[in-house]
Image (tube, rainbow, N blue to C red):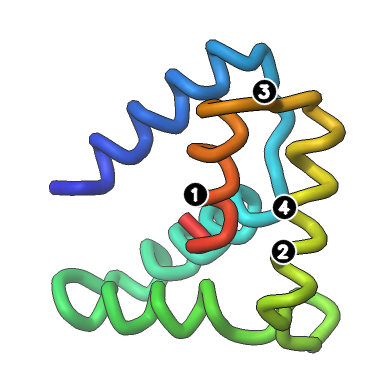
């Protein structure tokens, strides 16, 4: 139920900032979603899989530390020249991994 709202909110932010390039967390979400679909997961099993997939090791096999996530999110926000409330909303979303 929250996913459509979150997707709509993300699309609105992207429209407002003019940035349509997929970020690393978005690509990761997409690949985890595809994998969950291939496995036919639903309900609590899908939630558990998505949580472990999104917080697990990266493609290169290394786990992203909170410090690295902060660096990555800061760099991405700076690259998009975000300021004020838009940056705050982006950072909140990026740091939570959503």
Are the residues flagged by discs 2 and 4 in contact, CB closer than 8 Å? Answer: yes
Comes first in the chain, label 2 or label 3: 3
Residue 70's disc number? 2
In the image, residue 29 sits, relative to residue 8, either above or below, namely below
Q: Residues within 10 Å of mark 2 (few under 14, many from 20)?
A: some
Q: Say whether residue 55 is left or right of residue 74.
A: left
Q: Residues within 10 Å of mark 1 (few under 14, many from 20)?
A: some
Residue 56 at what x, y percent from top left?
Answer: 59, 85
Comes first in the chain, label 3 or label 4: 3
**Alpha carbon of mark 2 to alpha carbon of mark 1: how far?**
11 Å
**Alpha carbon of mark 2 to alpha carbon of mark 3: how far?**
21 Å
Comes first in the chain, label 1 or label 3: 3
> Which secondary structure, mark 1?
helix
**Residue linked to disc 4:** 73
Count of all numbered marks drawn on residues in the image: 4
**Alpha carbon of mark 2 to alpha carbon of mark 4: how far?**
5 Å
**Residue linked to disc 3:** 20
**Between marks 3 and 4 in the image, the one whose residue lies nearer the viewer:** 4
> Which secondary structure, mark 4?
helix
Residue 93's disc number? 1
Which one is in front, 31 or 93? Answer: 93
Q: Residues within 10 Å of mark 4 (few under 14, many from 20)?
A: many
> Which secondary structure, mark 3?
loop
């Amino acid at each position: 139920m929250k996913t459509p709202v979150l997707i709509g909110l993300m699309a609105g932010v992207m429209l407002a900032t003019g940035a349509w390039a997929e970020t690393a967390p978005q690509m990761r979400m997409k690949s985890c979603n595809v994998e969950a679909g291939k496995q036919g997961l639903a309900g609590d099993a899908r939630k558990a899989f998505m949580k472990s997939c999104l917080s697990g090791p990266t493609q290169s096999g290394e786990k992203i530390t909170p410090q690295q996530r902060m660096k990555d999110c800061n760099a991405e926000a700076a690259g998009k020249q975000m300021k004020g409330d838009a940056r705050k909303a982006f950072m909140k979303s990026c740091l939570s991994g959503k």
